[in-house]
């Protein structure tokens, strides 16, 4: 079990308020989808939760300890991170990228020991990467590369996962595949937060939706409770028809409004 | 090729190159005479040629090349760009400026360690400036331009010193630092720089996993548990020490740090950590071979090693830059 708590977090940069009194928690056993228009403060919230950014006010704790007090290694063992950019500086081999997930355990790409080897092998298997193990990452398709990054996050065996638009620029089938992998990770005891722009996808996979706009959280709750036509208008300024059919949600935007 | 085969293979090539450097020269030495001289037998003339001239020179070329190859690989890993290198980033130029200042003001006569320390101070000043710039900009092009500015500025100051040189003796000393050479180096020169290189090596070795992690970008590396400020300062400090010590042996020699990692990278799966050791050995081999070339090319005065390295290296730099521009569309 692990839990990250953000308490009345504010972030200011260059006179602009990026986050305003944001409180939320990310915990094991729950998948949160963070939803909101561009510039709503979603990435800023994630960066505060990862100690990539220091709030100007408020606190961020992980398992009760201030996140800034944890060493990078201690933090990385509790929470793994998938940033938006999947680009690699070098065309490294797939297996080596996944092995980087074991960084916080002292593993190096050149030498993997028992537990690290097992974790890397399991993550490669779960993400269906075995046949790609020796491929250069610059020869992979966008969907394959997204799976490689998921595998390196899973290989760390961290109880929490923070993913910033993990399905951006992927086709529908790969979006579904990546979200299924993250869902399986949560069902096996993990917990996490993902930024998603596809609200129907978020509604299908997430346990809870956090709706953000202008640096504030406007709603935070279950899908049934918070996904409404009024909410779509409030957050995205669009009129939309929201419908549920058994387990899957559909969303039709019928027009923008001002 | 398997990773564990590459290092022994390169080491064997390095050994062969150093042996060749001892055999080849204005008067060729036969392998039999070389063995006799190594064993302490043979003629006094041969012993002097081997122990006082050829072997120290070959080892100096290897050590300097290895230092530059390693620094290039480490800086490229840190900055995530294959064009980063002590020469291109102005580190070598600042180091030789430090050394020439020490020579010019006569500080070199105070203690033999003065020149290496001055060179390393110059190198560290440059790497520190670059690392501050690296925090403020994510653009490597900007960094390379800053390096270009540093190089030009250090070059201008050195030109000024040449201009003001009081006598021809100082002048030729200064020129030799600017152009780079391993001629007339003794084992003492190498031993003086070696401890500083070893300290720098420790810093680089400690950061090698972070360099691999940085393949994913800085934010992802942070997420993996990399202590970014620490990794950055270790690589900067390590390369400053090593490049500065290399300059204190041979003056400014450019482009080895670009060529060696570029050739090695495809053989080790492009992993920055695995690139380090082979780049160092290959950098050493390139410089030993270039120095053999310097000694063989008939010229009224011996060509400077730094000049030859730049003649090979600068086109390689352009070639890599063009390839990279194409790859990025």
Image (cartoon, coloured by chain):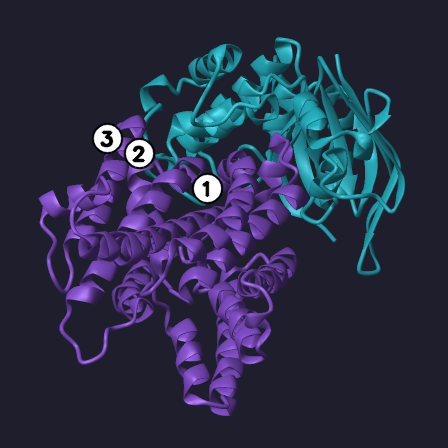
Chain colours: A cyan, B purple
Q: Which of disc 3 and disc 2 is earlier in sequence?
A: 3
**Which residue is under mark 1?**
A88
Q: Are marks 2 and 3 on the same chain?
A: yes
Frontmost residue, B275 versus A76: B275
- Image coordinates of residue A243 in percent, x first then y, are 65, 24
Q: Is residue A161 visible?
A: no
Is label 3 in a helix, a strand or a loop? loop
For mark 1, give the secondary structure: loop
Give above or below for B204 relative to B27.
above
- Within 10 angstroms of label 3, few (less than 14), some, or many (20 or more) residues? few
User: In the figure, A44 relative to A5: above or below?
Assistant: below
Q: What's the CA distance linking mark 1 and mark 3?
A: 23 Å
Label 2 marks a residue whose chain is B
Residue B325, image x, y percentages: 35, 60
Q: Disc 2 designates what residue? A: B7
**Image position, residue A244 (x, y; %):** 64, 20
Q: Nearer the viewer, residue A76 or B25?
A: B25
Lateral position of residue B10 relative to residue B145, left or right: left
The N terminus of chain A - image quarter = top right
From the image, state whether disc 2 or disc 3 is nearer to you.
2
- Check disc 3 and report the residue beneath it: B1
Q: Using the image, determine if residue B93 lies above or below residue A81.
A: below
Q: In which chain is the residue bearing label 1?
A: A
Q: Residue at x 54, y 25 (%)?
A: A101
Q: How many marks?
A: 3
B225 lies above or below A222: below
The mark lying in front, picked from 1 and 2, is 2
């Amino acid at each position: 079990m692990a839990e990250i708590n953000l308490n009345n977090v504010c972030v200011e940069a260059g006179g602009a308020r990026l986050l305003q009194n944001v409180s939320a928690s990310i915990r094991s056993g729950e998948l949160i989808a963070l939803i909101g228009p561009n510039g709503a403060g979603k990435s800023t919230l994630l960066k505060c939760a990862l100690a990539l950014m220091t709030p100007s006010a408020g606190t961020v704790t992980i398992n009760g300890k201030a996140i800034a007090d944890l060493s990078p290694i201690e933090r990385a063992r509790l929470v793994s991170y998938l940033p938006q950019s999947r680009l690699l500086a070098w065309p490294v081999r797939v297996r080596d990228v996944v092995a980087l997930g074991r960084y916080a355990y002292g593993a190096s790409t050149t030498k993997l020991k028992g537990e690290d080897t097992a974790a890397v092998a399991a993550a490669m298997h779960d993400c269906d990467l075995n046949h790609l193990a020796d491929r250069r990452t610059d020869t992979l398709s966008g969907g394959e590369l997204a799976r490689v990054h998921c595998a390196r996050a899973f290989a760390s065996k961290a109880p929490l996962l923070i993913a910033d638009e993990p399905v951006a620029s992927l086709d529908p089938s790969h979006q579904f595949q990546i979200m299924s992998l993250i869902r399986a990770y949560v069902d096996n005891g993990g917990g996490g937060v993902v930024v998603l722009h596809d609200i129907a996808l978020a509604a299908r996979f997430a346990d809870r939706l956090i709706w953000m706009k202008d640096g504030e959280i406007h709603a935070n709750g279950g899908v049934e409770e918070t996904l409404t036509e009024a909410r779509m208008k409030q957050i995205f300024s669009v009129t939309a028809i929201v419908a549920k059919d058994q387990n899957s949600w559909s969303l039709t935007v019928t027009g923008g409004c001002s | 090729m398997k990773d564990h085969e590459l290092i022994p293979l390169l080491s064997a090539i390095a050994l062969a190159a150093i042996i060749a450097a001892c055999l080849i020269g204005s008067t060729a030495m036969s392998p039999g005479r070389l063995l006799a001289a190594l064993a302490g037998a043979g003629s006094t003339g041969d012993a002097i040629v081997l122990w006082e001239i050829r072997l120290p020179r070959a080892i100096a070329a290897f050590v300097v090349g290895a230092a530059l190859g390693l620094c290039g690989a480490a800086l490229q890993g840190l900055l995530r760009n294959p064009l980063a290198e002590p020469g291109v980033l102005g580190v070598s130029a600042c180091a030789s400026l430090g050394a020439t200042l020490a020579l010019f003001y006569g500080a070199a006569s105070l203690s033999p360690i003065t020149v290496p320390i001055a060179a390393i101070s110059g190198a560290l000043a440059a790497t520190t400036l670059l690392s501050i710039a690296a925090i403020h900009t994510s653009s490597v092009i900007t960094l390379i331009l800053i390096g270009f500015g540093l190089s030009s500025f250090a070059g201008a100051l050195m030109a000024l010193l040449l201009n003001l040189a009081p006598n021809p003796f100082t002048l030729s000393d200064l020129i030799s630092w600017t152009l780079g050479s391993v001629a007339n180096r003794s084992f003492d020169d190498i031993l003086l720089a070696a401890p500083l290189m070893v300290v720098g090596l420790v810093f680089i070795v400690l950061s090698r996993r972070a360099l691999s992690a940085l393949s994913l970008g800085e934010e992802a590396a942070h997420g993996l548990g990399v202590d970014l400020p620490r990794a950055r300062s270790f690589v900067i400090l390590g390369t400053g020490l090593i490049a500065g010590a290399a300059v204190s042996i041979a003056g400014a020699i450019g482009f080895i740090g670009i060529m060696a990692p570029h050739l090695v990278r495809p053989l080790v799966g492009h992993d920055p950590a695995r690139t380090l050791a082979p780049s160092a050995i290959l950098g050493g081999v390139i410089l030993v071979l270039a120095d053999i070339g310097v000694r063989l090319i008939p010229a009224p005065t011996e060509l400077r090693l730094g000049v030859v390295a730049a003649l090979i290296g600068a086109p390689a730099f352009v070639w890599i830059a063009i390839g990279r521009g194409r790859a990025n569309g």
